Image (spheres, rainbow, N blue to C red):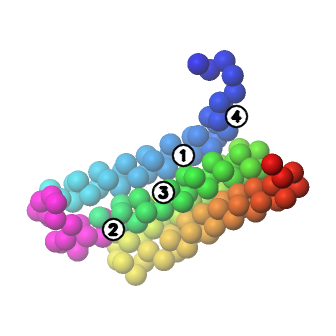
Amino acid sequence: MFGGKTPMLTYPLTAIVSLLALLVYFYMGLRVGQGRGKYGVAAPAVTGHPNFERDYRIQMNTLEWLPLFLVSLWLFAAAWNSDLVAAGVGVVWIIGRILYLAGYARAAEARSTGFGIQALAVGVLLFGALGRIIWAFVQHPA
């Protein structure tokens, strides 16, 4: 099972960052569940107390960005064969999401800094992977 190189063993830092990102998302989900109880918002309702609604939007916005982040993270790591750089940019994304959570939980207007940081990190991963893959294809077409 672990005899050959697998993507996780080739890119262990990228794998760890992926799991850390999912742990942050898991925490956000727990906050929504706690908010339902605290503010009396029974499922399937997604509106009610403003604090609950912000926690819900924090979780849902993160869910909306997770596919962009995770796919771009792994394609960047593979395209550049750089576990450290991919993981480093991934940590920046996580920090951005945590700042987004902290800001948005206080007030909707306070979410911009964290959102900008995570969006920039995704842009680096997405366009970095895309550019490298296109460059490699042009150099050595299939």
| Mark 4: amino acid | Thr
Separation of disc 4 and disc 2 at Cα? 35 Å
Residue type for callout 2: Arg
**Would you name the residue on which mark 3 appears?**
66
Instruction: Verify CB contact (< 8 Å) between mark 3 and mark 4.
Output: no
| Labelled disc at residue 57 | 2
| Secondary element at tag 1 | helix
Mark 1 to mark 3: distance in Å?
10 Å
Query: Where is mark 1, residue-wise?
Result: 18
Q: Residue at x 57, y 46 (%)?
A: 17
Answer few, some or many: residues within 10 Å of disc 1's Cα (few below 14, many 20 plus, some between 14 and 19): many
Amino acid type shown at disc 1 = Ser
Q: Earlier in the sequence, mark 1 or mark 3?
A: 1
Which of pointers 4 and 2 lies earlier in the amino acid sequence?
Answer: 4
Say whether marks 2 and 1 touch (CB < 8 Å): no
Q: Nearer the viewer, residue 81 or 16?
A: 81
- How far apart, in angstroms, are the residues tagged by discs 2 and 1? 21 Å
Q: Residue at x 60, y 59 (%)?
A: 92
Secondary structure under tag 4 reads helix
User: What label does residue 10 carry, if any?
Assistant: 4
114 left or right of 50? right
Left or right relative to 30: residue 116: right
Q: Which sits earlier in the primary sequence, circle 2 or circle 1? A: 1
